[in-house]
Amino acid sequence: MVSGNDMGRQATAALPDAGAPLAIELRGISKAFGPVQANKDISIQVKRGSIHGIIGENGAGKSTLMSILYGFYKADAGEILIGGKLTAIPDSQSAIRAGIGMVFQHFKLVQNFTVLENVILGAEDGGLLRPSLAKARRVLADLSREYGLDVNPDALIEDLSVGHQQRVEILKALYRQADILILDEPTGVLTPAEADHLFRILKGLKDQGKTIILITHKLREIMEITDTVSVMRRGQMTATVKTAETSPEQLAELMVGRKVLLQVEKRAATPGKVVLEVENLSVRDENKVERLKGVSLTIRAGEILGIAGVAGNGQSELLEVLGGIARGTGTIRLNGVELDLTGKHSDGQSRRAQGIAHVPEDRQHLGMIMDFAAWENVAFGYHHAPEYQKNALFMDNDALRADTEKKMARFDVRPPNPLLAAKNFSGGNQQKIIVAREIERNPDLLLIGQPTRGVDIGAIEFIHKQIVALRDAGKAILLVSVELDEIMSLSDRIAVMFDGQIMGIRDPATTDERDLGLMMAGVAGKAA
Protein backbone atom coordinates (compact mmCIF):
# COMPACT_ATOMS: atom_id res chain seq x y z
CA MET A 1 0.00 0.00 0.00
CA VAL A 2 1.24 3.49 -0.79
CA SER A 3 1.58 5.65 2.32
CA GLY A 4 0.11 9.12 2.62
CA ASN A 5 3.54 10.72 2.41
CA ASP A 6 4.48 8.66 -0.66
CA MET A 7 1.21 9.60 -2.32
CA GLY A 8 1.89 13.26 -1.62
CA ARG A 9 5.26 12.97 -3.34
CA GLN A 10 3.56 11.24 -6.30
CA ALA A 11 0.88 13.90 -6.61
CA THR A 12 2.39 15.63 -9.63
CA ALA A 13 2.46 12.33 -11.52
CA ALA A 14 -1.31 12.12 -11.18
CA LEU A 15 -1.99 15.55 -12.65
CA PRO A 16 -3.42 15.77 -16.18
CA ASP A 17 -1.13 14.43 -18.88
CA ALA A 18 1.35 16.87 -20.37
CA GLY A 19 -0.32 18.70 -23.23
CA ALA A 20 -3.84 17.68 -22.14
CA PRO A 21 -6.28 20.59 -22.49
CA LEU A 22 -7.10 22.15 -19.14
CA ALA A 23 -10.47 23.58 -18.20
CA ILE A 24 -9.17 25.18 -15.00
CA GLU A 25 -5.79 25.95 -13.54
CA LEU A 26 -5.33 27.61 -10.17
CA ARG A 27 -1.85 28.87 -9.33
CA GLY A 28 -0.71 29.78 -5.83
CA ILE A 29 -4.15 30.65 -4.47
CA SER A 30 -4.08 32.01 -0.91
CA LYS A 31 -6.89 33.43 1.19
CA ALA A 32 -6.96 34.47 4.85
CA PHE A 33 -9.81 35.61 7.07
CA GLY A 34 -8.06 37.60 9.76
CA PRO A 35 -5.56 35.26 11.45
CA VAL A 36 -7.12 32.15 9.86
CA GLN A 37 -5.37 30.97 6.69
CA ALA A 38 -8.20 29.26 4.81
CA ASN A 39 -6.19 28.57 1.62
CA LYS A 40 -2.40 28.57 1.43
CA ASP A 41 -0.54 28.56 -1.90
CA ILE A 42 -2.92 26.13 -3.61
CA SER A 43 -2.26 25.01 -7.17
CA ILE A 44 -4.51 22.62 -9.04
CA GLN A 45 -5.17 21.60 -12.63
CA VAL A 46 -8.50 20.23 -13.87
CA LYS A 47 -8.58 18.50 -17.23
CA ARG A 48 -11.32 19.48 -19.67
CA GLY A 49 -14.10 16.91 -19.99
CA SER A 50 -13.30 15.17 -16.68
CA ILE A 51 -14.96 14.71 -13.29
CA HIS A 52 -12.57 16.02 -10.66
CA GLY A 53 -13.28 15.39 -6.97
CA ILE A 54 -12.15 17.60 -4.11
CA ILE A 55 -12.22 16.11 -0.63
CA GLY A 56 -10.98 17.13 2.78
CA GLU A 57 -12.00 17.39 6.40
CA ASN A 58 -14.45 19.99 7.63
CA GLY A 59 -12.62 23.31 7.52
CA ALA A 60 -9.93 22.08 5.12
CA GLY A 61 -10.62 24.98 2.75
CA LYS A 62 -12.57 23.26 -0.05
CA SER A 63 -15.54 25.61 -0.04
CA THR A 64 -13.32 28.68 0.23
CA LEU A 65 -11.35 27.58 -2.81
CA MET A 66 -14.49 26.98 -4.87
CA SER A 67 -15.97 30.27 -3.66
CA ILE A 68 -12.89 32.01 -5.05
CA LEU A 69 -13.34 30.20 -8.36
CA TYR A 70 -17.02 31.20 -8.48
CA GLY A 71 -16.34 34.82 -7.51
CA PHE A 72 -17.80 34.88 -4.02
CA TYR A 73 -14.39 35.62 -2.51
CA LYS A 74 -11.34 37.38 -3.93
CA ALA A 75 -8.04 35.59 -3.40
CA ASP A 76 -5.28 37.43 -1.52
CA ALA A 77 -2.77 35.99 -3.97
CA GLY A 78 -2.65 33.69 -6.98
CA GLU A 79 -4.00 33.34 -10.50
CA ILE A 80 -6.97 31.68 -12.18
CA LEU A 81 -6.74 30.36 -15.73
CA ILE A 82 -9.86 29.23 -17.58
CA GLY A 83 -9.19 27.35 -20.80
CA GLY A 84 -5.54 28.38 -20.58
CA LYS A 85 -6.31 32.11 -20.34
CA LEU A 86 -5.65 34.25 -17.29
CA THR A 87 -9.13 35.24 -16.05
CA ALA A 88 -10.23 37.72 -13.39
CA ILE A 89 -13.29 36.54 -11.45
CA PRO A 90 -14.29 39.36 -9.07
CA ASP A 91 -17.91 38.23 -8.77
CA SER A 92 -20.30 35.41 -9.69
CA GLN A 93 -21.47 37.17 -12.87
CA SER A 94 -17.86 37.11 -14.07
CA ALA A 95 -17.72 33.39 -13.27
CA ILE A 96 -20.89 32.77 -15.28
CA ARG A 97 -19.46 34.74 -18.22
CA ALA A 98 -16.33 32.56 -17.96
CA GLY A 99 -18.52 29.47 -18.37
CA ILE A 100 -18.65 28.39 -14.71
CA GLY A 101 -21.84 27.26 -12.99
CA MET A 102 -22.32 26.18 -9.39
CA VAL A 103 -24.94 23.89 -7.87
CA PHE A 104 -25.09 24.61 -4.17
CA GLN A 105 -25.78 22.11 -1.41
CA HIS A 106 -28.79 24.23 -0.40
CA PHE A 107 -30.61 25.07 -3.61
CA LYS A 108 -31.09 28.69 -4.68
CA LEU A 109 -34.59 28.32 -6.08
CA VAL A 110 -37.75 30.40 -5.63
CA GLN A 111 -40.25 27.86 -4.33
CA ASN A 112 -43.43 29.45 -5.71
CA PHE A 113 -41.95 30.04 -9.19
CA THR A 114 -42.13 27.53 -12.02
CA VAL A 115 -39.12 25.67 -13.34
CA LEU A 116 -39.08 27.95 -16.39
CA GLU A 117 -39.22 31.11 -14.28
CA ASN A 118 -36.37 29.91 -12.07
CA VAL A 119 -34.21 29.06 -15.07
CA ILE A 120 -34.44 32.53 -16.64
CA LEU A 121 -34.29 34.45 -13.34
CA GLY A 122 -31.38 36.86 -13.71
CA ALA A 123 -30.82 35.84 -17.33
CA GLU A 124 -33.75 37.52 -19.04
CA ASP A 125 -33.38 38.87 -22.59
CA GLY A 126 -34.62 42.42 -22.11
CA GLY A 127 -37.56 43.90 -20.29
CA LEU A 128 -40.29 41.69 -21.78
CA LEU A 129 -40.66 38.26 -20.20
CA ARG A 130 -42.72 36.58 -22.92
CA PRO A 131 -39.86 36.28 -25.47
CA SER A 132 -37.46 35.17 -22.72
CA LEU A 133 -39.85 32.46 -21.55
CA ALA A 134 -40.47 31.22 -25.09
CA LYS A 135 -36.74 31.01 -25.78
CA ALA A 136 -36.08 29.31 -22.44
CA ARG A 137 -38.79 26.72 -23.13
CA ARG A 138 -37.12 25.77 -26.43
CA VAL A 139 -33.62 25.64 -24.93
CA LEU A 140 -34.81 23.64 -21.90
CA ALA A 141 -36.43 21.06 -24.14
CA ASP A 142 -33.13 20.63 -26.01
CA LEU A 143 -31.08 20.45 -22.81
CA SER A 144 -33.47 17.96 -21.22
CA ARG A 145 -33.22 15.64 -24.21
CA GLU A 146 -29.46 15.98 -24.53
CA TYR A 147 -28.58 15.37 -20.87
CA GLY A 148 -31.50 13.35 -19.53
CA LEU A 149 -32.64 16.18 -17.27
CA ASP A 150 -36.37 15.63 -17.65
CA VAL A 151 -38.35 18.23 -15.68
CA ASN A 152 -41.76 19.72 -16.40
CA PRO A 153 -40.99 23.40 -17.20
CA ASP A 154 -44.39 24.52 -15.89
CA ALA A 155 -44.16 22.71 -12.54
CA LEU A 156 -43.83 24.78 -9.37
CA ILE A 157 -40.56 24.18 -7.53
CA GLU A 158 -42.40 23.50 -4.28
CA ASP A 159 -44.18 20.58 -5.95
CA LEU A 160 -40.96 18.89 -7.14
CA SER A 161 -38.94 16.24 -5.34
CA VAL A 162 -35.48 17.19 -4.09
CA GLY A 163 -33.90 15.21 -6.93
CA HIS A 164 -35.89 17.12 -9.54
CA GLN A 165 -35.07 20.44 -7.88
CA GLN A 166 -31.41 19.58 -8.23
CA ARG A 167 -31.94 18.95 -11.94
CA VAL A 168 -33.39 22.46 -12.19
CA GLU A 169 -30.21 23.86 -10.65
CA ILE A 170 -28.13 22.01 -13.24
CA LEU A 171 -30.43 23.24 -16.03
CA LYS A 172 -30.00 26.81 -14.77
CA ALA A 173 -26.23 26.48 -15.12
CA LEU A 174 -26.44 24.86 -18.56
CA TYR A 175 -28.92 27.50 -19.76
CA ARG A 176 -26.26 30.07 -18.92
CA GLN A 177 -23.91 28.06 -21.17
CA ALA A 178 -21.72 26.71 -18.39
CA ASP A 179 -18.92 24.41 -19.54
CA ILE A 180 -17.65 23.93 -15.98
CA LEU A 181 -20.02 22.76 -13.23
CA ILE A 182 -19.16 22.85 -9.52
CA LEU A 183 -21.37 20.66 -7.32
CA ASP A 184 -21.18 21.06 -3.53
CA GLU A 185 -22.19 17.90 -1.60
CA PRO A 186 -24.81 17.07 -4.24
CA THR A 187 -26.13 13.80 -2.76
CA GLY A 188 -26.68 14.95 0.82
CA VAL A 189 -30.47 15.18 0.39
CA LEU A 190 -31.01 12.45 -2.22
CA THR A 191 -32.24 8.88 -1.96
CA PRO A 192 -29.85 6.21 -3.28
CA ALA A 193 -31.90 5.94 -6.49
CA GLU A 194 -31.80 9.72 -6.99
CA ALA A 195 -28.04 9.74 -6.35
CA ASP A 196 -27.55 7.01 -8.96
CA HIS A 197 -29.58 9.03 -11.45
CA LEU A 198 -27.51 12.12 -10.70
CA PHE A 199 -24.33 10.18 -11.39
CA ARG A 200 -25.73 9.06 -14.75
CA ILE A 201 -26.47 12.71 -15.55
CA LEU A 202 -22.95 13.79 -14.57
CA LYS A 203 -21.41 11.06 -16.69
CA GLY A 204 -23.58 12.20 -19.60
CA LEU A 205 -22.41 15.78 -19.11
CA LYS A 206 -18.82 14.58 -19.09
CA ASP A 207 -19.38 12.62 -22.30
CA GLN A 208 -20.63 15.86 -23.89
CA GLY A 209 -17.38 17.60 -22.96
CA LYS A 210 -18.45 19.34 -19.78
CA THR A 211 -16.04 19.57 -16.84
CA ILE A 212 -17.36 18.65 -13.39
CA ILE A 213 -15.87 19.54 -10.02
CA LEU A 214 -17.43 17.45 -7.24
CA ILE A 215 -17.03 18.51 -3.60
CA THR A 216 -18.01 15.66 -1.29
CA HIS A 217 -17.00 13.95 1.93
CA LYS A 218 -18.27 10.57 0.73
CA LEU A 219 -15.31 8.50 -0.35
CA ARG A 220 -17.52 5.90 -2.01
CA GLU A 221 -18.87 8.53 -4.38
CA ILE A 222 -15.37 9.76 -5.18
CA MET A 223 -14.30 6.24 -6.09
CA GLU A 224 -17.43 5.61 -8.16
CA ILE A 225 -17.63 8.67 -10.37
CA THR A 226 -14.44 10.77 -10.46
CA ASP A 227 -11.45 10.55 -12.80
CA THR A 228 -9.10 12.51 -10.56
CA VAL A 229 -9.27 13.57 -6.93
CA SER A 230 -7.53 16.36 -5.02
CA VAL A 231 -7.14 16.12 -1.26
CA MET A 232 -7.01 19.16 1.01
CA ARG A 233 -5.87 19.36 4.61
CA ARG A 234 -5.67 22.47 6.79
CA GLY A 235 -5.94 24.86 3.89
CA GLN A 236 -3.31 23.19 1.73
CA MET A 237 -3.40 20.75 -1.16
CA THR A 238 -1.80 17.51 0.02
CA ALA A 239 -2.17 15.46 -3.17
CA THR A 240 -3.87 15.11 -6.53
CA VAL A 241 -4.17 11.51 -7.71
CA LYS A 242 -5.90 9.50 -10.39
CA THR A 243 -8.89 7.84 -8.79
CA ALA A 244 -8.14 4.48 -10.39
CA GLU A 245 -4.74 4.46 -8.68
CA THR A 246 -5.91 5.10 -5.11
CA SER A 247 -8.30 3.66 -2.51
CA PRO A 248 -10.70 4.99 0.14
CA GLU A 249 -8.21 4.06 2.86
CA GLN A 250 -5.39 6.00 1.21
CA LEU A 251 -7.60 9.03 0.61
CA ALA A 252 -8.76 9.01 4.24
CA GLU A 253 -5.15 8.90 5.40
CA LEU A 254 -4.29 11.85 3.17
CA MET A 255 -7.26 13.81 4.53
CA VAL A 256 -6.51 13.22 8.20
CA GLY A 257 -2.77 12.60 8.25
CA ARG A 258 -3.09 9.17 9.88
CA LYS A 259 -4.69 5.82 9.22
CA VAL A 260 -8.46 5.84 9.71
CA LEU A 261 -10.78 2.90 10.33
CA LEU A 262 -13.51 3.32 7.69
CA GLN A 263 -15.61 0.31 8.70
CA VAL A 264 -17.36 0.22 12.07
CA GLU A 265 -16.03 -2.65 14.15
CA LYS A 266 -18.71 -4.19 16.33
CA ARG A 267 -19.71 -7.63 17.47
CA ALA A 268 -23.22 -8.99 17.02
CA ALA A 269 -25.80 -7.42 19.31
CA THR A 270 -27.21 -9.32 22.27
CA PRO A 271 -30.51 -7.52 22.88
CA GLY A 272 -32.01 -7.69 26.36
CA LYS A 273 -35.25 -6.36 27.80
CA VAL A 274 -37.48 -3.92 25.94
CA VAL A 275 -36.44 -0.38 26.91
CA LEU A 276 -38.57 1.75 24.57
CA GLU A 277 -42.08 1.01 23.28
CA VAL A 278 -43.80 3.44 20.93
CA GLU A 279 -47.39 2.77 19.91
CA ASN A 280 -49.47 4.71 17.39
CA LEU A 281 -47.50 7.95 17.85
CA SER A 282 -48.81 10.93 15.90
CA VAL A 283 -47.60 14.53 15.73
CA ARG A 284 -49.06 17.63 14.08
CA ASP A 285 -47.03 20.79 13.46
CA GLU A 286 -48.11 24.36 14.19
CA ASN A 287 -50.05 24.38 10.88
CA LYS A 288 -51.95 21.23 11.92
CA VAL A 289 -50.12 19.17 9.28
CA GLU A 290 -49.63 15.57 10.41
CA ARG A 291 -45.87 14.87 10.53
CA LEU A 292 -45.98 11.50 12.32
CA LYS A 293 -48.76 9.10 11.35
CA GLY A 294 -49.27 6.26 13.80
CA VAL A 295 -45.63 5.27 14.31
CA SER A 296 -44.97 2.13 16.34
CA LEU A 297 -41.56 0.63 17.23
CA THR A 298 -39.57 -1.00 20.02
CA ILE A 299 -35.91 -0.89 21.04
CA ARG A 300 -34.22 -3.33 23.41
CA ALA A 301 -31.28 -2.90 25.71
CA GLY A 302 -27.99 -3.50 23.89
CA GLU A 303 -29.42 -2.64 20.48
CA ILE A 304 -29.13 0.17 17.93
CA LEU A 305 -32.27 0.86 15.92
CA GLY A 306 -31.39 3.03 12.92
CA ILE A 307 -33.98 5.24 11.26
CA ALA A 308 -33.29 5.69 7.53
CA GLY A 309 -35.04 8.17 5.29
CA VAL A 310 -34.69 11.32 3.28
CA ALA A 311 -34.72 14.38 5.55
CA GLY A 312 -38.19 15.75 6.25
CA ASN A 313 -40.09 12.48 6.49
CA GLY A 314 -40.83 12.53 10.22
CA GLN A 315 -37.47 11.53 11.71
CA SER A 316 -36.94 14.92 13.36
CA GLU A 317 -40.43 14.93 14.86
CA LEU A 318 -39.88 11.43 16.26
CA LEU A 319 -36.70 12.53 18.03
CA GLU A 320 -38.33 15.72 19.30
CA VAL A 321 -41.34 13.95 20.85
CA LEU A 322 -39.18 11.30 22.48
CA GLY A 323 -36.78 13.98 23.71
CA GLY A 324 -39.48 16.22 25.17
CA ILE A 325 -39.10 19.05 22.66
CA ALA A 326 -42.45 18.48 20.92
CA ARG A 327 -45.79 17.01 21.94
CA GLY A 328 -47.80 14.24 20.34
CA THR A 329 -50.53 11.66 20.81
CA GLY A 330 -50.15 7.94 21.30
CA THR A 331 -48.21 5.90 23.84
CA ILE A 332 -44.53 5.90 24.79
CA ARG A 333 -43.20 3.57 27.48
CA LEU A 334 -39.68 3.63 28.90
CA ASN A 335 -38.80 0.50 30.86
CA GLY A 336 -42.50 -0.26 31.07
CA VAL A 337 -43.46 3.15 32.48
CA GLU A 338 -45.74 5.31 30.34
CA LEU A 339 -44.36 8.79 29.61
CA ASP A 340 -46.29 12.05 29.67
CA LEU A 341 -46.79 13.37 26.11
CA THR A 342 -48.79 16.54 26.72
CA GLY A 343 -48.55 17.60 30.39
CA LYS A 344 -46.00 19.26 32.65
CA HIS A 345 -43.76 16.17 32.64
CA SER A 346 -43.46 16.05 28.84
CA ASP A 347 -40.43 18.36 28.67
CA GLY A 348 -36.75 17.62 28.10
CA GLN A 349 -35.85 17.97 31.79
CA SER A 350 -38.38 15.27 32.68
CA ARG A 351 -37.08 13.01 29.92
CA ARG A 352 -33.51 13.31 31.22
CA ALA A 353 -34.66 12.50 34.74
CA GLN A 354 -36.38 9.40 33.36
CA GLY A 355 -33.16 8.15 31.72
CA ILE A 356 -33.32 9.53 28.17
CA ALA A 357 -30.30 11.39 26.74
CA HIS A 358 -30.60 13.33 23.49
CA VAL A 359 -27.98 14.40 20.96
CA PRO A 360 -30.08 16.68 18.71
CA GLU A 361 -29.80 16.87 14.94
CA ASP A 362 -28.94 20.57 14.93
CA ARG A 363 -26.09 20.95 17.39
CA GLN A 364 -25.75 24.72 17.06
CA HIS A 365 -29.42 25.58 17.63
CA LEU A 366 -30.64 22.78 19.89
CA GLY A 367 -27.46 21.29 21.36
CA MET A 368 -25.41 24.31 22.45
CA ILE A 369 -25.40 28.02 23.11
CA MET A 370 -22.57 29.11 20.87
CA ASP A 371 -21.47 32.14 22.89
CA PHE A 372 -21.26 30.13 26.12
CA ALA A 373 -18.10 28.36 27.28
CA ALA A 374 -17.60 24.62 26.84
CA TRP A 375 -18.05 23.97 30.58
CA GLU A 376 -21.37 25.83 30.55
CA ASN A 377 -22.56 23.77 27.58
CA VAL A 378 -21.62 20.56 29.39
CA ALA A 379 -23.90 21.66 32.26
CA PHE A 380 -26.99 22.17 30.08
CA GLY A 381 -29.79 19.89 31.12
CA TYR A 382 -27.74 18.43 33.97
CA HIS A 383 -27.04 21.50 36.08
CA HIS A 384 -29.18 20.10 38.91
CA ALA A 385 -26.98 17.00 39.20
CA PRO A 386 -25.69 16.57 42.79
CA GLU A 387 -22.04 16.61 41.72
CA TYR A 388 -22.50 20.11 40.31
CA GLN A 389 -24.16 21.61 43.42
CA LYS A 390 -22.22 23.64 45.97
CA ASN A 391 -25.30 24.18 48.09
CA ALA A 392 -29.01 24.65 47.61
CA LEU A 393 -28.56 28.00 45.85
CA PHE A 394 -25.43 27.82 43.71
CA MET A 395 -23.75 25.55 41.19
CA ASP A 396 -20.19 24.46 41.86
CA ASN A 397 -18.54 26.01 38.80
CA ASP A 398 -15.11 24.68 39.77
CA ALA A 399 -16.49 21.14 39.84
CA LEU A 400 -18.15 21.70 36.46
CA ARG A 401 -14.94 22.97 34.86
CA ALA A 402 -12.96 20.06 36.29
CA ASP A 403 -15.56 17.59 35.03
CA THR A 404 -15.49 19.21 31.58
CA GLU A 405 -11.71 18.88 31.46
CA LYS A 406 -12.03 15.14 32.13
CA LYS A 407 -14.69 14.74 29.45
CA MET A 408 -12.58 16.68 26.96
CA ALA A 409 -9.62 14.39 27.65
CA ARG A 410 -11.70 11.20 27.31
CA PHE A 411 -13.37 12.39 24.09
CA ASP A 412 -10.26 13.98 22.57
CA VAL A 413 -11.82 17.46 22.26
CA ARG A 414 -9.39 19.93 20.72
CA PRO A 415 -8.38 22.35 22.09
CA PRO A 416 -9.02 20.84 25.56
CA ASN A 417 -9.99 24.20 27.03
CA PRO A 418 -13.26 24.28 29.04
CA LEU A 419 -13.20 28.09 29.11
CA LEU A 420 -13.31 28.44 25.31
CA ALA A 421 -16.63 29.51 23.78
CA ALA A 422 -18.47 26.81 21.84
CA LYS A 423 -18.35 28.88 18.65
CA ASN A 424 -14.55 28.68 18.65
CA PHE A 425 -14.51 24.89 18.31
CA SER A 426 -14.75 23.10 14.95
CA GLY A 427 -17.99 21.30 14.12
CA GLY A 428 -16.47 17.94 14.97
CA ASN A 429 -15.29 19.11 18.38
CA GLN A 430 -18.65 20.75 19.11
CA GLN A 431 -20.25 17.40 18.39
CA LYS A 432 -17.80 15.61 20.68
CA ILE A 433 -18.71 17.96 23.55
CA ILE A 434 -22.43 17.20 23.10
CA VAL A 435 -21.86 13.45 22.73
CA ALA A 436 -19.67 13.45 25.86
CA ARG A 437 -22.31 15.37 27.82
CA GLU A 438 -25.08 12.92 26.91
CA ILE A 439 -23.29 9.57 26.84
CA GLU A 440 -21.49 10.12 30.13
CA ARG A 441 -24.82 10.45 31.97
CA ASN A 442 -25.24 6.66 31.52
CA PRO A 443 -28.75 6.88 29.99
CA ASP A 444 -31.08 3.94 29.50
CA LEU A 445 -31.97 5.33 26.06
CA LEU A 446 -29.82 7.51 23.82
CA LEU A 447 -31.52 9.50 21.06
CA ILE A 448 -28.91 10.59 18.56
CA GLY A 449 -29.69 12.56 15.41
CA GLN A 450 -27.27 13.04 12.52
CA PRO A 451 -24.29 12.11 14.74
CA THR A 452 -21.64 12.94 12.14
CA ARG A 453 -23.23 15.73 10.08
CA GLY A 454 -20.49 18.12 9.02
CA VAL A 455 -17.94 16.17 11.05
CA ASP A 456 -14.37 15.33 10.04
CA ILE A 457 -13.60 11.77 9.06
CA GLY A 458 -11.37 11.30 12.11
CA ALA A 459 -14.12 12.49 14.45
CA ILE A 460 -16.63 10.24 12.64
CA GLU A 461 -14.51 7.22 13.53
CA PHE A 462 -14.36 8.31 17.18
CA ILE A 463 -18.09 9.06 17.53
CA HIS A 464 -19.03 5.73 15.96
CA LYS A 465 -16.85 3.92 18.51
CA GLN A 466 -18.60 5.71 21.38
CA ILE A 467 -22.05 4.77 20.07
CA VAL A 468 -21.08 1.11 19.75
CA ALA A 469 -19.46 1.13 23.21
CA LEU A 470 -22.71 2.45 24.73
CA ARG A 471 -24.66 -0.31 22.99
CA ASP A 472 -22.21 -2.91 24.28
CA ALA A 473 -22.76 -1.53 27.78
CA GLY A 474 -26.39 -2.62 27.48
CA LYS A 475 -28.04 0.66 26.51
CA ALA A 476 -30.78 1.22 23.92
CA ILE A 477 -29.99 3.60 21.07
CA LEU A 478 -32.24 5.28 18.50
CA LEU A 479 -30.06 6.53 15.64
CA VAL A 480 -31.35 8.93 12.98
CA SER A 481 -29.11 9.67 9.99
CA VAL A 482 -29.51 10.62 6.34
CA GLU A 483 -26.20 8.84 5.67
CA LEU A 484 -27.25 5.39 4.51
CA ASP A 485 -23.72 4.00 4.92
CA GLU A 486 -23.78 5.11 8.55
CA ILE A 487 -27.19 3.57 9.17
CA MET A 488 -26.19 0.25 7.61
CA SER A 489 -22.85 -0.04 9.41
CA LEU A 490 -24.03 1.00 12.89
CA SER A 491 -27.57 -0.37 13.15
CA ASP A 492 -28.66 -3.77 14.44
CA ARG A 493 -32.09 -3.18 12.89
CA ILE A 494 -33.15 -0.53 10.37
CA ALA A 495 -36.56 1.15 10.25
CA VAL A 496 -37.30 3.19 7.12
CA MET A 497 -39.49 6.29 7.32
CA PHE A 498 -41.43 7.93 4.52
CA ASP A 499 -44.08 10.63 4.87
CA GLY A 500 -44.30 10.24 8.64
CA GLN A 501 -44.74 6.45 8.61
CA ILE A 502 -42.58 3.39 9.18
CA MET A 503 -42.42 1.68 5.79
CA GLY A 504 -40.67 -1.42 7.07
CA ILE A 505 -37.97 -2.78 9.36
CA ARG A 506 -34.95 -4.59 7.97
CA ASP A 507 -31.95 -6.58 9.14
CA PRO A 508 -28.76 -4.86 7.87
CA ALA A 509 -27.27 -8.26 7.09
CA THR A 510 -30.04 -9.18 4.67
CA THR A 511 -30.95 -5.87 3.02
CA ASP A 512 -29.20 -3.56 0.60
CA GLU A 513 -29.30 0.06 -0.53
CA ARG A 514 -31.78 -0.66 -3.32
CA ASP A 515 -34.28 -2.24 -0.92
CA LEU A 516 -33.92 0.60 1.57
CA GLY A 517 -33.97 3.21 -1.18
CA LEU A 518 -37.31 1.95 -2.51
CA MET A 519 -38.85 2.27 0.93
CA MET A 520 -37.25 5.71 1.42
CA ALA A 521 -39.02 6.76 -1.79
CA GLY A 522 -42.33 5.33 -0.59
CA VAL A 523 -42.39 2.70 -3.31
CA ALA A 524 -42.27 -0.54 -1.34
CA GLY A 525 -45.14 -1.80 0.75
CA LYS A 526 -44.92 -2.04 4.50
CA ALA A 527 -43.07 -5.03 5.86
CA ALA A 528 -42.37 -6.18 9.38
Image (spheres, rainbow, N blue to C red):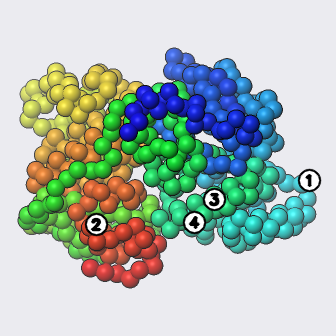
Q: Earlier in the sequence, mark 2 or mark 1?
A: 1
Callout 3 secondary element: helix
Number of the front mark, 3 or 1: 3
Callout 1 secondary element: loop
Q: Residue 177: x, y in percent?
A: 80, 52
Number of the front mark, 4 or 3: 3
Q: Earlier in the sequence, mark 2 or mark 4?
A: 4
Q: Which residue is identified by label 3?
A: 203
Contact between labelled residues 1 and 2, with CB atoms less than 8 Å apart: no
**Please, what is the three-letter code of the amino acid marked with disc 1?**
Gly
Number of the front mark, 2 or 1: 2
What is the crowding at mark 2: few (fewer than 14 residues within 10 Å), some, or many (at least 20)? some
Q: Quadrant of the N terminus?
A: top left
Q: Residue 427: x, y in percent?
A: 40, 36
Mark 3 to mark 2 CA distance (whole Å): 30 Å
Q: Is residue 220 left or right of 119 when viewed as pictured?
A: left
**Please, what is the three-letter code of the amino acid marked with disc 4?**
His
Number of the front mark, 3 or 2: 3
Mark 2 to mark 1 CA distance (whole Å): 56 Å
Disc ID at residue 197: 4
Judge by depth and name the residue closer to the eye, 318 or 502: 502
Q: Is residue 208 left or right of 31 when viewed as pictured?
A: right
Tell me the quarter of the picture where residue 518 sits.
bottom left
What is the crowding at mark 4: few (fewer than 14 residues within 10 Å), some, or many (at least 20)? some
Mark 4 to mark 1 CA distance (whole Å): 35 Å
Q: Is residue 328 above or below residue 78?
A: below
**Please, what is the three-letter code of the amino acid marked with disc 2?**
Pro
Q: Earlier in the sequence, mark 3 or mark 1?
A: 1
Contact between labelled residues 1 and 4, with CB atoms less than 8 Å apart: no
Q: Which residue is identified by label 2?
A: 508
Q: Is residue 473 above or below residue 378?
A: below
